[in-house]
Amino acid sequence: MKLKLNFFSIFFVIIFLICILFYFNPFALNSNIGYTMTSKIDINTEQDVYIDSVCVKNGEKVKRGDVLMILRSIPIEHLNSEIKINLKNIEKINNLESSNINANILKLRGEKNQKISQLTSELKKAEEEFNFQKKIFSSENKSVEFKSRSILIETLKEQIKTTENEYNKLINENIKILNLPKQVSIDEELYKQQYKNNLDNVNKLKIVAPFDGIVNLLHVYKGQFVSKHGILLSFSELMPSNTVVFIHERKHLDFNVGDSVLIISRYDFKKRMKGTIFSIGNKFVLMPQKITESPGIEFFGREIYVKNSFNNSFLDNESIILKKM
């Protein structure tokens, strides 16, 4: 009796350990695991300054336009000239990127029209030959098998339809990329705000929040001298705007750019948000230890980048599961 009891105890312990292993192994669950990310920036000084006052604390939440600190500086007319140059460079970068994408869209449309025109011409020729032969044999009261010619016509029609769909998909993906927010927009906003502050107050420069966010870390204190390009503070979004997900290299990639997806907290299934895939990695990369949770074992997978829904309740670097909607 005692031996039988020990056997059942060992059996249940083994079952429990297997359940724990499957719970913490993302690949046993066949899940797409990732983590959320907030955009982070370092706010720097563009000149030698003294810190006149610090208006925020580490970890403090602020709104766009709130004053973070006030700097005491030398005359800054020359700085405004540099800011104008930087703004022009940003504009050139944006225009160049947009021009490249637009050029690619025009190229795809040209290739599409050329291929469809060629296939349409072949289809028209095949239909004319089919009708001509049918008319001849019909006038002589003879029967003929037109099956091969009919198959050719149907094949050409299908090729036209497939070609149009494939090129339309590529063109739409380029249009989506063209409409994505530019990465340099935060820098542009900072430059514009700095320029405005310089005009409003020549002797003192106010550093303000470029968007609603959190002061992650102050790098300076009141009265400190900071040389040009020195870091004043680190700043981040209030909530994660993006998510990166890893698809194990052994799994089939069942996602496409533009797909709507559901993001679920890995340890709080009630916490959910919607997202849209805006980029997919083109190579296998080493997956973070945070994702694999298998010490000493390396896993590789493809990265999927997702734009999160606005005003979500997730935290930065929170583990998530990605599902198709």
Image (spheres, rainbow, N blue to C red):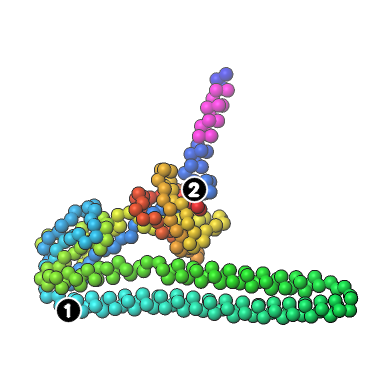
Name the residue tied to disc 1: 78
Helix, strand or loop at label 1? It is: helix
Please provide percent x and percent y for residue 79: 18, 76
Q: Position of residue 117 (x, y in %)?
A: 62, 80
What's drawn in magenta, residue-wise?
A: 4-16
Nearer the observer, disc 1 or disc 2? 1
Query: Seen in the image, is 191 located left or right of residue 128?
Result: left
Depth check: 62 or 118 in front? 118
In this rendering, position of residue 271 left or right of residue 56: right
Label at residue 26: 2
- The residue under the point 73% across, 77% down is 127
Q: Quadrant of the N terminus?
A: top right
Q: Residue furthest top?
A: 1
In the rendered image, the vertical position of residue 13 relative to residue 3, given as above or below: below
Residue at 19 percent across and 54 percent down: it is 57
**Residue 221 sits inside the magenta stretch:** no
In the figure, residue 161 lies in which quadrant?
A: bottom right
- Residue 289 shows up from this direction: no
Position of 131 with respect to 118 (left or right) is right
Within-10-Å neighbours for mark 1: few <14, some 14–19, many 20+: few
